[in-house]
């Protein structure tokens, strides 16, 4: 199962994504591909389009973490709110494969 945790809600200060969905075979798992694609789109938009330097950015096989300071989070709020919306929608469609939580900071 993919576990997604968002830090804060107004604004979102970052996120952590861990795990593999187990929906399909490695390399052809559409759930993992969807989550990875939207997470990379969000991070690339934040770092390369908005030119925000995260407090923390980590990625490894099956794991990604992004943390922002309050000012940067405000600047990136539309991107991160869109990420929350998209991943929540995926988690509703693939309940057994993705879990999304929001932790207040």
Image (cartoon, rainbow, N blue to C red):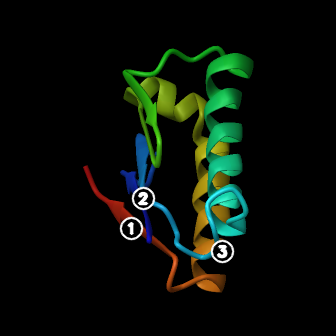
Identify the element where label 2 is drawn.
loop
Label 1 sits on residue: 101
Q: Does 93 appear above or below 21?
A: below
What residue is rendered at 47% in x and 42% in y? 61
> What x and y, as percent, mark residue 88?
58, 71
Q: In front of the other: label 2 or label 3? A: 2
Q: Does 45 appear above or below 53?
A: below
* N-terminal-most mark, 1 or 3: 3
Nearer to the camera, 80 or 43: 43
> What x and y, as percent, mark residue 56?
37, 25
What residue is rendered at 48% in x and 62% in y? 20
Q: Which mark is residue 19?
A: 2
Query: For residue 94, what is the image quadrant?
Result: bottom right
Query: For residue 55, what is the image quadrant?
Result: top left
Label 3 sits on residue: 89
Marks 2/1 in contact by CB < 8 Å: the verdict is no
| Quadrant of image for the N terminus | bottom left
* N-terminal-most mark, 2 or 3: 2
Rate crowding at label 2 as few (under 14), some (14 to 19) or many (20 or more) other CA atoms within 10 Å. Answer: some
Q: In front of the other: label 2 or label 1? A: 2
The answer for how far apart the CA atoms under marks 1 and 3 are is 13 Å
Q: Does 47 appear above or below 83?
A: above
> What x and y, as percent, mark residue 69?
38, 26
What residue is rendered at 74% in x and 20% in y? 49
């Amino acid at each position: 199962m993919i576990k997604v945790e968002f830090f804060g809600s107004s604004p979102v200060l970052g996120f952590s994504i861990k795990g593999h969905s187990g929906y399909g075979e490695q390399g052809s798992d559409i759930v993992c591909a969807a989550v990875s694609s939207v997470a990379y789109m969000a991070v690339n938009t934040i770092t390369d389009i908005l030119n925000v330097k995260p407090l923390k950015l980590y990625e490894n096989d099956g794991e990604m973490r992004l943390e922002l300071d309050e000012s940067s989070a405000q600047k990136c709020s539309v991107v991160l709110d869109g990420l929350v919306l998209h991943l929540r929608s995926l988690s509703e469609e693939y309940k057994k494969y993705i879990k999304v939580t929001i932790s207040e900071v």
